[in-house]
Image: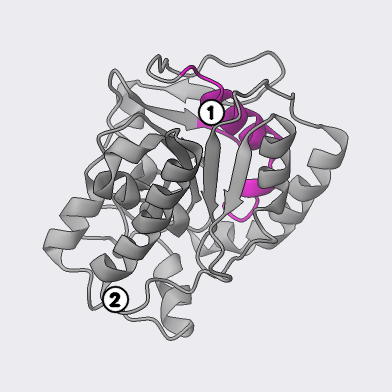
Amino acid sequence: MPSSLGFRAPPLALLATEPLRAVLEFCAVRWNQPAVVAGDGHPVVVYPGLGAGSMTTAPLRAHLKTCGYDVYDWELGVNTGPEGRFDDWLAALAARVREIHARHERKVSLVGWSLGGVYAREIAKHCPECVRQVVTLATPHKAIGDGNHAGTLYRLMGGSLAQLTPALLQRLGQRPPVPVTSIYSESDGVVCWQGCLERPGPDAENVAVHASHLGMPTHPDVLGIVADRLAQPEGRWRPYARRRGLRSRPTGSSRSRK
């Protein structure tokens, strides 16, 4: 079904391949370990996707810890979507980021997968003074309405899309005032990849990978790209440059814009 912005959910045939592809990608990381990037130890919070919890992002968090970051799980269990009024619930997530920022006396990087990336982006808008950068994995911030299959899962889990007013959808599509990297896959079977694209700029970029939606937080290329992005010196953000051996590519061409 097309969304109000013209985005379309991926074909059902592609959606059907997601579980098998995710398993293969999880196995691939065992043989193709991402390179360890020397991080500076700053705090990082990782947010899971809809219907996912800490186990699904464990490989990503483990790799970032190996790289030297002080990594935090979001610590709210399975992501079943916002509880109660969205902005009130979001304020509680932002309060935890402020707490981590105060504890370390350093800005916090936020990494979010799918719906978790929406949280990361909105938290950065709430407290930009506490956030170093945002990295999203297959987050359709411009196609939250009908341009994906996640809405069906959300409804099956008992959630309601009543809060997705036109004003809120417009707000979700706006980028936060911090450096942003959007990692996406054109073979994503769950969300419309065009809806994941950020308008490239001095501190915003899109990086394509060959991955399933479900396999994003375990894919070796994704793990390597996230670690690379977090390793940039604070205040000196630069666009991603592909390292040898990665199959991903940065995008800023007209083909990648919607």
Quadrant in which the C terminus is drawn:
top left
What element does badge 2 sit on?
loop
Q: Which residues are magenta?
A: 208-233
Q: Nearer the viewer, residue 132 or 112?
A: 132
| Residue 235 picture location, percent across and down | 37, 18
Q: Is residue 224 magenta?
A: yes
- Name the image quarter holding residue 36: top right
Up the image or down, 44 lies above or below 6; here it is above
**Residue at which label 2 appears:** 161
Quadrant in which the N terminus is drawn:
bottom left
Within 10 angstroms of label 2, few (less than 14), some, or many (20 or more) residues? few
**Residue at which label 1 appears:** 230
Q: Earlier in the sequence, mark 1 or mark 2?
A: 2
Residue at x-position 65% and y-position 36%: 223
Tell me whether circle 1 and circle 2 mark residues in contact (CB < 8 Å).
Answer: no
Which mark's residue is nearer the viewer, 1 or 2? Answer: 1
Up the image or down, 217 lies above or below 151; here it is above
**Left or right relative to 253: residue 219:** right
